[in-house]
């Protein structure tokens, strides 16, 4: 299992979640390949992936609410999906929710993490064990988790709201 | 089987047999004695009836006599007398000799035995004697229906006189029978008491014997259980038994629970148990394998080789929901039980540490190999140079990471990011190359390839952030490589401090045919890393098949770390440029009547007023303006007519701004056209002026002028307005 494949699985899961969300609210799908990029790059309203960069394992990370998934198997990893209130509020509103309290936002970030975990279970196969996602307190102190020296931070944006997918992966 | 059963339970069988014998004995005795008592009761009743008959015979005799005197009818009295007389006589005869009598209670005939007891015989003897007298007196009355006075009077007198005697004898006989009956009753009671007592004693013997035996057995079982519990709780392996139905035994070792972090082990289906920890494919293979042990004619030693649960990876979920990966080793052994059934002893060992250690060993071996390779590259480097290299490289990688982080999601911004990252990378690669860090330099070279690939993609379509993922991944790898170098440096400690003394430098410089004009020590003290360029020049020149010599001058001036690092980096890029494009091969030089050895000079001079000049020059072929022009046209930067009218200065400006290279092939030091652009960027960052002098086939000079105040607070470069590239030809 290459590191690239591992990261791709989670990115694809994220794209899948927001595509599904877009379909439910009648928006176009995310820009993920060349032809789509050519057509939609300027005015895309789907999920937009920012430039991934590295995060040193010596700081606190995370936005307002964070869901966490642990992966074990030939590679051990931790994946965080962290979102601000603004994004979660937009998603809740898209679902027609009128309750926008913290409890609902926590549930929502857990649901996103759960979708990523489900996708990873399907894609990574039986050689990997994907934990039940947990919603954790933010900011996250990276020292509390057994993360790699450098984690990948993949910023993404949905309808102008930014959030982060943080992936730590290391060989077992 | 019966023999062994009888043998094992002999005491029980004998005890139960005795119990039955006692009970049956009492029962038989009871039956017999009851019969006797019943017979005796009949005798008592018969004897009592004899007593009554005596009275009735007397009464009948008196009746007959009375009736006869009054000349009344006496026939009924006579019939009664005769009947009583015959009954009495028959009964007495039965008492004497045995026979049949009519039961007084049931009026049915019953058989009785002759009285044999001497006491009874004596009573009967006296009764017989008296009865014979009764017979003598009464017999005349039995003959005819008419009774004479002579016949009735003596009979009546005799009966009246002896009636009470016979009554007393019959009473005595009754009492005798009663006494006999009582004796028999007492005997029966005694026999019953004895029998029941024996049976009870036997019962208690059985009870206590078996209770004792059960207690001993229980103690033995408890002891064995305790022993097996102790064994199972102390062994360091997970152990359980597996039966033919693939069910796990009730007993198992404590370690099994620890390995699988569960208490739900006993009596579980093996398949369901495994499913919690292993993929379905592994589970089904494991079950098929375990079933082989229960098949006939299977050589277990042979099938052990195909055991699918050898060093198998298990995912074990902890209480908090976290998962833990363990490597487990299952082994199977066939056991034959007493009842000839088979079970399989399954032993589970947690070999996680061992496997991790093996992996670690392999990794360590790889790491060691990598470290050894690094060691050969690190050892010749001055410790402070190495530290500076690591620090500079980390700072460079951090800058690249910041560029990635700060990139906006727009194609134009992506282009800018790619260009900036390319320059940073080129600088890092140059520094690594000078220090002979092949591993790092190659890493940066690959990084540049990836940058170019992304750049090419950007020409075909709009980029997304995901396109940068390979870069980020390589960046992580570069950080890891630096960490590795740092680890090796830390491990080497003081051994890396191999600064060459003046003599050694001179020797080295001499062997490399290098020239330096200042005191080696001075340069070594102020800017030691410049010396790395001497060997680096030789190495690169050899790679490119040219002869070259580097001259260092004026490098003993004190410069601050930043300035020194920037100038050094510029020198590296210009050195690459000279060796790739400037200096000719020995053959070409000879044809041009030049010395075969190409000369490159790097010098720093100043006017003691804070105005410094950094000069880099070579005696090579100078700028190839036509090649730059062709490259600009080829890349579509300019069309042919535009390019044609461009002057040399403008062409050189393009060479410094765009990725223009006059080398056909990209190699690790040149060909991407980034070097001069990077130099220009650094010159701008230093607020310096760049002048270029180039004469075709004669020389090229790069003159960088800047202001600097040494040994003052901060040692800052003075603000000198930057100026466009000025070409002086």
Image (cartoon, grey):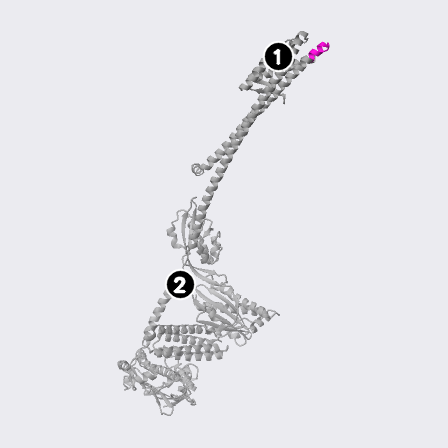
Q: Which residue is mark 2?
A: B356
Q: Which residues are magenta?
A: B63-73
The reply, left or right, for residue B198 in relation to residue B436 is right
Relative depth, front residue between B618 and B294: B294
Q: Crowding at label 2, few (<14), some or many (≥20) Cα neighbours within 10 Å?
A: some
Q: Is residue B425 above or below residue B645?
A: above
Q: Is residue B72 magenta?
A: yes
Estimate the spatial distance between the alpha carbons at disc 1 and disc 2, rounded to whole Å. 128 Å
How many labels, in total? 2
Q: Position of residue B558 (x, y in %)?
A: 36, 86
| Main secondary structure of the magenta stretch | helix
The residue drawn where x is 44% and y is 48% is B223
- SS under mark 1: helix
Q: Is residue B74 visible?
A: no
Q: Which residue is mark 1?
A: B134
Q: Which mark is residue B461?
A: none
Q: Is residue B525 visible?
A: yes
Q: Position of residue B261 (x, y in %)?
A: 47, 58
Q: Is residue B257 magenta?
A: no
Q: Position of residue A93 (x, y in %)?
A: 60, 71
Q: Is residue B127 above or below residue B340?
A: above
Callouts 1 and 2 in the same chain:
yes
- SS under mark 2: helix
Q: Crowding at label 1, few (<14), some or many (≥20) Cα neighbours within 10 Å?
A: some
Relative depth, front residue between B208 and B351: B208
Discs 1, 2 touching: Cβ within 8 Å:
no
Q: Nearer the viewer, mark 1 or mark 2?
A: 1
**Chain for mark 1?**
B
Relative depth, front residue between B314 and B456: B314
Q: Position of residue B283 (x, y in %)?
A: 46, 56
């Amino acid at each position: 299992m290459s590191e690239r494949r591992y990261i791709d699985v989670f990115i694809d899961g994220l794209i899948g979640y927001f595509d599904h969300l877009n379909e439910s609210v009648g928006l176009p799908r995310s820009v993920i390949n060349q032809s789509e990029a050519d057509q939609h790059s300027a005015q895309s309203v789907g999920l937009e992936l920012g430039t991934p960069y590295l995060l040193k394992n010596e700081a606190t990370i995370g936005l307002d609410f964070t869901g966490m998934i642990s992966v074990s198997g030939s590679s051990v990893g931790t994946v965080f999906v962290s979102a601000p209130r603004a994004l979660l509020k937009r998603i809740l509103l898209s679902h027609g929710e009128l309750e926008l309290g913290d409890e609902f936002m926590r549930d929502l970030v857990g649901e996103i993490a759960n979708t990523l975990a489900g996708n990873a279970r399907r894609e990574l196969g039986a050689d990997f064990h994907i934990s039940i996602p947990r919603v954790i307190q933010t900011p996250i102190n990276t020292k509390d988790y057994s993360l790699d020296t450098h984690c990948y931070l993949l910023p993404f944006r949905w309808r102008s709201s930014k959030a982060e997918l943080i992936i730590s992966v290391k060989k077992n | 089987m019966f023999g062994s059963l009888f043998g094992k339970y002999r005491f029980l069988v004998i005890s139960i047999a005795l119990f039955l014998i006692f009970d049956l004995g009492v029962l038989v005795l009871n039956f017999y004695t009851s019969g006797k008592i019943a017979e005796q009761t009949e005798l008592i009743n018969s004897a009592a009836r004899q007593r009554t008959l005596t009275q009735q015979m007397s009464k009948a005799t008196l009746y007959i006599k009375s009736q006869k005197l009054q000349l009344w009818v006496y026939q009924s009295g006579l019939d009664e007398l005769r009947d009583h007389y015959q009954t009495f006589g028959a009964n007495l005869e039965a008492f004497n000799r045995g026979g049949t009598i009519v039961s007084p209670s049931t009026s049915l005939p019953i058989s009785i035995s002759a009285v044999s007891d001497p006491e009874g015989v004596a009573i009967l003897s006296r009764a017989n004697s008296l009865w014979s007298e009764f017979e003598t007196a009464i017999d005349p009355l039995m003959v005819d229906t008419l009774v004479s006075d002579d016949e009735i009077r003596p009979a009546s007198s005799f009966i009246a006189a002896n009636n009470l005697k016979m009554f007393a004898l019959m009473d005595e006989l009754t009492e005798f029978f009663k006494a006999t009956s009582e004796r028999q009753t007492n005997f029966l009671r005694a026999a019953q008491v004895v029998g029941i007592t024996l049976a009870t004693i036997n019962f208690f013997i059985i009870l206590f014997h078996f209770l004792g035996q059960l207690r001993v057995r229980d103690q033995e079982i408890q002891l064995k259980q305790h022993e097996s519990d102790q064994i199972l709780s102390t062994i360091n392996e997970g152990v359980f038994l597996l039966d033919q139905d693939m069910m796990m035994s009730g007993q198992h070792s404590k370690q099994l629970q620890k390995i699988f972090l569960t208490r739900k082990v006993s009596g579980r289906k093996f398949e369901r148990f495994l499913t919690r920890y292993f993929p379905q494919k592994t589970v089904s293979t494991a079950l098929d394998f375990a079933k082989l042990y229960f098949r006939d004619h299977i050589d277990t030693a042979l099938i052990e080789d195909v055991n699918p649960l050898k060093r198998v990876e298990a995912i074990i979920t902890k209480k908090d929901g976290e998962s833990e990966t363990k490597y487990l080793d299952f082994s199977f052994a066939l056991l034959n039980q007493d009842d000839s059934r088979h079970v399989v002893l399954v032993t589970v060992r947690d070999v996680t540490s061992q496997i991790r250690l093996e992996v670690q060993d392999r990794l360590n071996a790889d790491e060691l190999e990598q470290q050894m390779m690094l060691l050969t590259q690190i050892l010749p480097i001055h410790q402070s140079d190495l530290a500076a290299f690591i620090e500079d490289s980390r700072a460079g990688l951090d800058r690249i990471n910041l560029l990635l982080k700060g990139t906006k999601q727009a194609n134009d911004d992506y282009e800018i990011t790619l260009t900036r990252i390319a320059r940073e990378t080129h600088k890092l690669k140059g520094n690594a190359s000078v220090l002979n860090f092949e591993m790092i330099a190659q890493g940066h070279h690959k990084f540049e390839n990836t940058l170019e690939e992304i750049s090419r993609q950007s020409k075909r379509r709009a980029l997304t952030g995901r396109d940068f993922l390979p870069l980020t991944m390589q960046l992580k790898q570069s950080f890891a490589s630096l960490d590795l170098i740092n680890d090796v440096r830390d491990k080497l400690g003081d051994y890396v401090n191999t600064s060459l003394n003046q003599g050694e430098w001179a020797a080295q410089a001499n062997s490399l045919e290098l020239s330096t004009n200042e005191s080696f020590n001075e340069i070594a003290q102020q800017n030691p890393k410049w010396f790395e360029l001497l060997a680096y020049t030789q190495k690169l020149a050899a790679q490119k098949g040219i002869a070259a010599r580097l001259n260092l001058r004026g490098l003993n001036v004190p410069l601050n770390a930043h300035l020194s690092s920037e100038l050094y980096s510029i020198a590296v890029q210009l050195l690459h440029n000279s060796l790739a494009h400037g200096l000719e091969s020995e053959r070409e030089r000879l044809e041009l009547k030049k010395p075969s050895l190409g000369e490159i000079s790097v010098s720093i001079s100043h006017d003691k007023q804070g105005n410094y000049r950094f000069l880099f020059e070579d005696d090579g072929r100078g700028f190839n303006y036509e090649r730059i022009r062709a490259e600009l046209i080829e890349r579509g930067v300019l069309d042919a007519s535009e390019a044609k009218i461009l002057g040399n200065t403008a062409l050189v400006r393009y060479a410094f701004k765009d990725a223009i290279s006059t080398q056909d092939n990209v190699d690790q030091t040149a060909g991407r056209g980034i070097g001069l652009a990077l130099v220009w960027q650094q010159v701008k960052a230093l607020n310096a002026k760049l002048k270029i002098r180039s004469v075709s086939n004669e020389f090229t000079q790069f003159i960088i002028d800047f202001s600097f105040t040494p040994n003052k607070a901060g040692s800052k470069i003075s603000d000198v307005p930057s100026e466009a590239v000025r070409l002086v030809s």
